[in-house]
Image (cartoon, grey):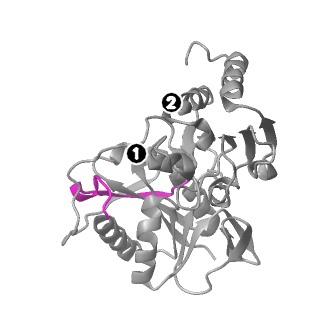
Amino acid sequence: MTKKVLVVTEVKDQELRQVSFEALAVGQKIADGGEVVGVLLGESIDSLTDSLFHYGADRVVTVNEANLKNFTTDAYQQAVLQVIDKEQPEAIILGHTSIGKDISPRIAMKLEAGLVSDVTAVEEVDGEIVFTRPIYSGKAFEKKKINDGIVMATIRPNNIAALQIDTSKSGEVTPVNVDIKDLRTTIKDIVRKTTEGVDLSEAKVIVAGGRGVKNSEGFEPLKELAQVLNGAVGASRGACDAEYCDYSLQIGQTGKVVTPDLYIACGISGAIQHVAGMSNSKIIVAINKDSEAPIFDIADYGIVGDLFDIVPLLTDELKKVLNVSEKV
C-alpha cells in the first residue's frame, strides 16, 4: 500500500544535514511508490529545496518563519504539528539528532502515534515495514513494527545510505504559513563550544582521545590526524572529566552515539560506557600502551604503544599516501 511520508529535515548553518538525505531514503522505502514530502523549517531556506528533490523528495514544504531561525522545542513542535495537520501523512521520519530526539516523542504523544527511535535499518517483511534499533547499549538489536496509526521513526545518522543523487529531479514547492505563539523560550545568542570542521555525529572518520592524552595539548596530534582524514575529533568521558577538552566532544552512553566508517581510539581504555557510544563503527582502530585494555576486545586493528609516538607516524604516512601534505 502506497503511503504519504513526511520527512522532517534539518538545517545547520544554512546547509542541510546529511541525516536529512538518509531520512529521505527511508521515506522512499516506506512510501512504496507513494509521495515523499520533505519539510524545511527555518528562515531564508528556499535555496535548499533543490537538494531535497535531488535526494528523493517528491514535493517540498517550506516553513519560513523568524521563530524557526534557531531551534527551540516549542516553535519547532508547533510548526511540525501544523504541517502534519495540513498534509495528513501516514508516516513521519526524522533524524535521531538532538532536535529529533527532542521533538519526536512530543509529536508522537500529541498524535497518539507509535514511535521507533534510533533506527539503524529499515526493511519490508511480508508487506510490512520493520525497523531495527539497538538495545542494551548496542549489545543487541530488536526489530519493531507499528501496527496501527501513523508510523513515526527517528533515523540514526551514518547507518542508512542516502539515495544516489539525481540532479535532474525537481518538484513542487509548497510554502506553508504557521501560527507560532506562547513561546516559553527565545534564543538571544548562540555560543559555540565545538571546534570548527566536520560534525561529530555525522563524521565518516573520528579520532578520539581518552585519559591517555594526558592533557589538553595531547589532543593536538589527534586533531592533525583528523584533519588529514577529513574527520572529527571526539573524546571519552574520562578526558572530558579531566578537562582535557569540552564535553561537546564526549562519545559514549552519556554523550554522543556515533557510527563512523573509521573510529581511531587513542589512549582510551574501553570502558563499557564509552563502547556503548561507538561500538557500531564500521572499522575500529585502537592505540593504547596497555595490551590488556578492553578496547582491544572490540577493535578490528590494535596497535600497542605510546600514542604520542604512533599518531604522528601515522599522520605522516597518511599525508604521503593521500598526498595532502600541502593542504594540512
Residue 43 placed where, x, y %?
28, 50
Q: CA distance from mark 1 to mark 2?
A: 39 Å
The quadrant holding residue 231 is top right
Residue 212 placed where, x, y %?
63, 39
Q: What residue is disc 2 on? A: 217
Instruction: Write the residue at 59% across / 36% down.
Output: 213
The N terminus sits in image quarter: bottom right
Q: What residue is disc 1 on? A: 48
Residue 316 placed where, x, y %?
68, 18
Residue 295 placed where, x, y %?
74, 49
Seen in the picture, residue 98 relative to 316 is either above or below; the reply is: below
| Highlighted range, magenta | 56-72
Q: Nearer the viewer, residue 157 or 318?
A: 318
The local crowd at label 1, few if under 14, some if 14 to 19, many if 20 or more residues have their Cα within 10 Å, is some
The quadrant holding residue 111 is bottom left
Q: Nearer the viewer, mark 1 or mark 2?
A: 2
Q: Nearer the viewer, residue 53 or 112?
A: 112
The C terminus sits in image quarter: top right
Seen in the picture, residue 234 relative to 121 is either above or below; the reply is: above
Residue type for callout 1: Leu
The quadrant holding residue 186 is bottom left
Q: Secondary structure at mark 1?
A: helix
Q: Residue furthest top?
A: 326
Q: Secondary structure at mark 2?
A: helix
Residue type for callout 2: Glu
